[in-house]
Amino acid sequence: MIDDADRLLLARALELAERGARTAAPNPLVGCVIARRGTVVAEGWHIRPGEPHAEAMALAVAQEGARDATVYVTLEPCAHHGRTPPCSDALIAAEVGRVVVLSNDPAPHASGKGLLQLVDAGIPVDVVDDDDPLAIAARRQNAGFRSAMTLGRPHVTCKAAQTLDGRTATWSGDSRWISGVEARARVHELRARVGAVLVGSGTALTDDPELTARDCDPPVEQQPLRVVWDRSARLGAASRLAQTVSRGPVLLLCAPGADASRRAAVAETGIEVVEVADLAAGLEVLHARDIQSVLCEGGAGLAGALHGAGLLDRMIVVVAPKLLGDPLAPGLLGETGTSATQMADAMSLAAWSSETIGDDLWIDAWLREPR
Ligand SMILES: NC(=O)c1ccc[n+]([C@@H]2O[C@H](COP(=O)([O-])OP(=O)(O)OC[C@H]3O[C@@H](n4cnc5c(N)ncnc54)[C@H](OP(=O)(O)O)[C@@H]3O)[C@@H](O)[C@H]2O)c1
């Protein structure tokens, strides 16, 4: 059982975990608080692979102060030897008094083992209920890691800006800008947190985006992989993506049999070109490169195709206080092949929330909760 004091410290552990958001992948985000009678003794978080786990960082600060203290951790402590020694051993050696855990480790080789070791060592362990909002927040925080472990593919979020009447561009293809500067700045932060940013060929050709994470505070250490879904390899050598390869890698996913001379022209610019059969195979390519989270920035054609293939996990929709009034202008999702004829058959979301950013409404919708 956890009480209100426990909840405050678990919320703090979640905040600490967030500090690894740009760097921890492909490891999970983990935060840890060591406390005695509600007073924090030490804090830790996982920064990047190869560096101490959150528990190890906190134990190193707490030293003797960890004995009989309560350890709050956002993910089950590991029990295996990876690049660093097992956290369960370290907690047992430090003779901590109790461990409170927010989420299980979804990795098949790790799941449940750390908890079992702690219990076997006589340390009381509380695992927060799966449907507790803090536990849900912990699983969402590691949506990418959990998707990689449980689905064998990256977590996919589609982000789009739309007018109040649901349009994502004019009929002529203009979409700059629908949302305001504040929301657009937030998108750069999103880019800084994902393994890859993805766009469809229509967006790449119409908008000619750069897709780097810019003007972030602090500046990004490593740009996400920029990926174009372009089955016919139509992206030109003069495109901004091709012209900015020196700022970060670009991958073009094309269909087998895409025109050889167009592919060669793209590859000449330094863009990597990989043939894939379909969208699922494209995500497999990313998964094989340890990319756990993908931010798809449009357009409606690609978002619809991802949704239709059952590969869309979350949508971030920025609604701007503008009206286009054009029934021919594109909406959020192009053809999905899954459209319902009755409202009763519409897909219900797992969860959603909204906030105001500048003049825009920022909607964060989870099509399914991370497992
Ligand atoms: N408001 C916003 O947030 C926002 C964001 C981005 C873009 N936009 C606007 O949206 C417009 C571009 O959107 P768009 O819908 O035309 O293009 P798009 O989504 O960027 O490109 C269409 C993509 O869907 C793929 N596709 C279509 N059907 C598919 C299927 N069955 N299986 C797999 N892939 C499939 C296409 O592959 P192929 O390569 O084979 O064609 C292509 O990559 C532009 O006007 C742009 O300004 C708005």
Image (spheres, helix red, strand yellow):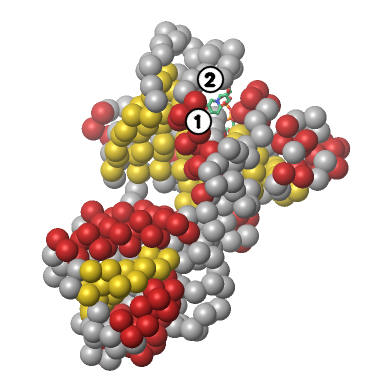
Looking at the image, residue 69 sits to the left or right of residue 3; the answer is right
Nearest the camera: 91 or 313?
A: 91
Question: Residue 62 location, x and y as percent?
Answer: 36, 78
Task: Judge whether residue 27 can be spotted in this image.
Answer: yes
> Looking at the image, is 163 positioned above or below residue 9?
above
Q: Quadrant of residue 70?
A: bottom left
> Looking at the image, is 168 positioned above or below residue 344?
above
* Rendered residue at 54%/35% (across/down): 297
Q: Give SS at disc 1.
A: helix
* Rendered residue at 29%/45% (across/down): 350
Looking at the figure, which quarter contains the C terminus? bottom left
Looking at the image, residue 99 sits to the left or right of residue 181; the answer is left
Could you classify mark 2 by the number of other residues whose Cα lies within 10 Å: few (under 14), some (14-19), or many (20 or more)?
A: few
Query: Gap in Å between the C-alphas at discs 2 and 1?
Result: 9 Å
Residue bearing mark 2? 177
Question: Residue 129 location, x and y as percent?
Answer: 20, 64
Q: Which mark is residue 184?
A: 1
Question: Do the residues bearing badges 2 and 1 touch, measured as CB atoms within 8 Å?
Answer: yes
Nearest the camera: 187 or 215?
A: 215
Q: Quadrant of residue 210?
A: top right
Looking at the figure, which quarter contains the N terminus? bottom left
The amino acid type found where label 1 is placed reads Arg
Q: Give SS at disc 2.
A: loop
